[in-house]
Amino acid sequence: MYTSTFFALLPLASVVAGALAGAALGRYCTPRAAAWALAAYAAVALVLIIRLAGVGEGEEIKAFAPFATLTAGLFPALFGAIPGWLGGRALARRA
């Protein structure tokens, strides 16, 4: 698989995986535990943002891995996990 295809499909796969993980968190975990899991995930994203902010002039190559991880992996998964969590909570209330 080509690198460009991989980076094109990774956000879609991350959203789906995040939604499934969020639904499982919402369905089977307590709200407090699920909120802690999502907060830990957001903290990892914050660490990568801080690493990106520390990239100086001439070090642009070092910024690619954190940037690709954030934009193609962490942010789409987090944006999928939050609605999935809410949907899982709704399923837990109905059961």
Image (tube, rainbow, N blue to C red):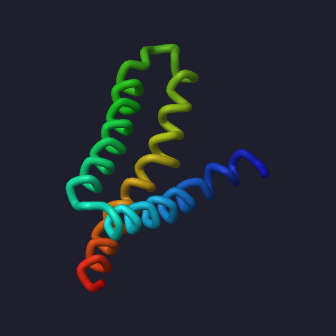
Q: Residue at x 31, y 61 (%)?
A: 29
Q: Is residue 42 above or below residue 94?
A: above
* Relative to 38, 74 lies left or right: right
Q: Quadrant of the C terminus?
A: bottom left
Most distant residue in the left direction: 32
* Relative to 16, 40 lies left or right: left
Q: Residue at x 52, y 56 (%)?
A: 14
Q: Position of residue 9 (x, y in %)?
A: 62, 58
Q: Residue at x 41, y 50 (%)?
A: 75
Foreground pick, 58 / 88: 88
Most distant residue in the bottom direction: 94
Q: Position of residue 12 (x, y in %)?
A: 54, 62
Foreground pick, 28 / 85: 28
* Relative to 60, 76 lies left or right: left
Q: Residue at x 32, y 35 (%)?
A: 46
Q: Position of residue 85 (x, y in %)?
A: 32, 65
Q: Position of residue 4 (x, y in %)?
A: 69, 49
User: Residue 30 lies in what quarter of the image?
Assistant: bottom left
Foreground pick, 19 / 64: 19
Most distant residue in the right direction: 1
Tell me how many marks there are.
Answer: 0
